[in-house]
Image: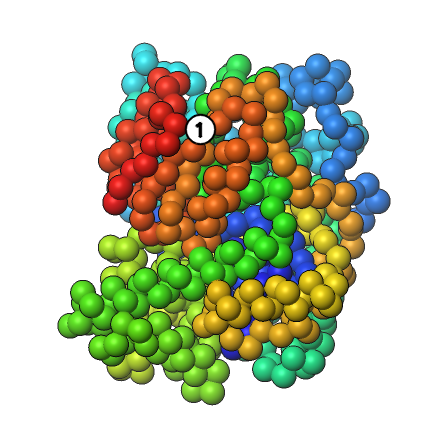
Amino acid sequence: MIITWYTCAMRTPRATRPRLLAACLAAGALLLTACSGHPRPQGAAPVPTGPAPSATATASPTPTARPTGAADPALKPFYGQQITWAGCPDDPRAEKVDTSTMQCGKLHVPLDYAHPEADAIDVALLRLPAAKPEQRIGSLVVNPGGPGESGVDMVLFGADRFKGALHDRFDVVGFDPRGVGGSAPVNCLDDKDRDALNSTDEPQDPQARQADRAKRAADFAAACQARSGKLLPFVGTRNTARDLDVMREALGDRKLNYLGISYGTYLGSLYAEEFPANTGRLVLDGAVDPAADKLDQSVNQAAGFEKSLERFAVDCVRNHADDCPLGNSPDQAAKKAADFLDGLREHPLTAKDGRRLTSDLGWTGAISYLYGDETTAWQQLRWSLGWAMARGKGDFLLASADNYNGRDDKGHYTTLEDAGRAIRCADSAPPAPSAERIQQVLGQLHEQAPLVSKGTSAEDYSTPSCAAWPYRTTETPHAVRAEGSAPILVVGTTGDPATPYAAAESLAKGFASATLLTREGEGHGAFGKDNGCIDAALEAYLVNGVPPAAGTRCAR
């Protein structure tokens, strides 16, 4: 199997991700990270709500002219709106969820902030009101990552993660960013086409793979243009940051209190850059460094998953021999797992529903578990690999891959992958690197991540995945200082494979005012990982405004 490690993105459509769900876009988009690991339903895919503009192309790219916020007369109708909250509509996915106290609403925002008098869209919101309203501080707006993940679902299916002081003192508000889920969703491929894309392994021959990717990327861009063309220039993260400021005002908050995980840290960073005076208490967990060189960043991410796979495999052999399918050699265990997953190309497994577990889906299912911690997630990975390797049954790995890809058990997909690509191409579309740079990166990649990068070649970097995209973004990587912002809390995990710890260190150093909080352990992100030290630090900062002392580290 082959993986392309160029300007990675956790949410990468299959056309540019040959083996690893964390694989990077071939000369593609900004590393806008990863799956947050928040609870995700297994029922029907959400039904898009809110008006979506017609698929008529517009020439104005993102970012648009810098808005002046509430002071701009043209934006006052948006900043002055009142959100109408009501009970949430029935959702077949939420049959076992207590939604009695949850409220849903919509936020009206301009499609193009440079021309707010033209088209507008609705942003879907879900609010979990403060459990102790007499002690209410304000709203805590949350984003789970992606890009393409639903913040509405994060609160709907993960309310328990906010129990305690956060739920007591805040209205917890989840939202679907523009282009996602219930917020004028980007739609490109239907379920049948998405299934075919995700379940077909790419050619092993480099030239054939290059041609195949170029065709898939062009076909995908054409499909997005045909179905969602008017949205595409305006789904970039900077416009979503502008939506956040409209949301802050409409929620009645003088300052924005915000929890962003993974890609959500990039969104939070751009908000602080755009509106530093309006920042309240911002937690950026599982950090993306917006200034990093994207090729170097992609190698670091590949190495992160390689190391995580190796640590899992060693733990499997040494500490769980009874249910570990990886033999008895710690030094060879990770390779045994990789060889099995690679072998699914020639010998795919058939699941109960008749679908095949291909190599691509097998890698996706296996590595998706590495987003979790070393207890529950690693246990599930041991069992899933054992079920496949010892019994020849790929159902659990396939279910894991489906869950990651946004596919429900009826074969319906969310907008996750379509929206993710559109957002990435709106945020960053660098040109292909030089031949010399490609060889340098390949050398680093094969040295630091030989298992997950097996078969990667120079051809995998030659065609930018956003080259066929109908719009060219003007966004470029840069350090975010956010001069004048309130103190920001950046959280990094030492064993985070998706957004390696060094990115959190760099992001915290780049801000004019920030503190780095470290979680020692495995998995992506720190929030919701049942670490009492982390939970206490986040509570003290969000509820009381007291950041942890510099250098604070929370052990496993």
Residue drawn at 60 percent across, 68 percent down: 442
Reply above or below: 494 against 307. Answer: above
Reply above or below: 75 against 104. Answer: above
Q: Secondary structure at mark 1?
A: strand
**Furthest residue toward right:** 59
**Furthest residue toward bottom:** 346
* Nearer to the camera, 339 or 381: 339
Q: Within 10 Å of the Cα at label 1, are there few (<14), some (14-19), or many (20+) other Cα atoms?
A: many
For this view, does 76 lie left or right of residue 250?
right
For the question of whether residue 408 can be seen, the reply is no
* Nearer to the camera, 280 or 247: 280
Q: Position of residue 299 (x, y in %)?
A: 55, 59
Location of the C terminus (image quadrant): top left
Reply above or below: 471 against 50. Answer: below
For the question of whether residue 68 can be seen, the reply is yes
For this view, does 348 lie left or right of residue 202?
left
Residue drawn at 35 percent across, 78 percent down: 336
Residue drawn at 76 percent across, 43 percent down: 474
Q: Mark 1 sits on what residue?
A: 515
Q: Position of residue 180 (x, y in %)?
A: 57, 46
Reply above or below: 126 against 228. Answer: above
The amino acid beneath tag 1 is Thr
**Furthest residue toward left:** 322
Residue 520: image quadrant is top left
Residue 218: image quadrant is bottom right
Number of marks drawn: 1
Q: Position of residue 483 (x, y in %)?
A: 61, 22
Q: Position of residue 546 (x, y in %)?
A: 37, 19
Residue 168: image quadrant is top left
For this view, does 155 lie left or right of residue 433?
left
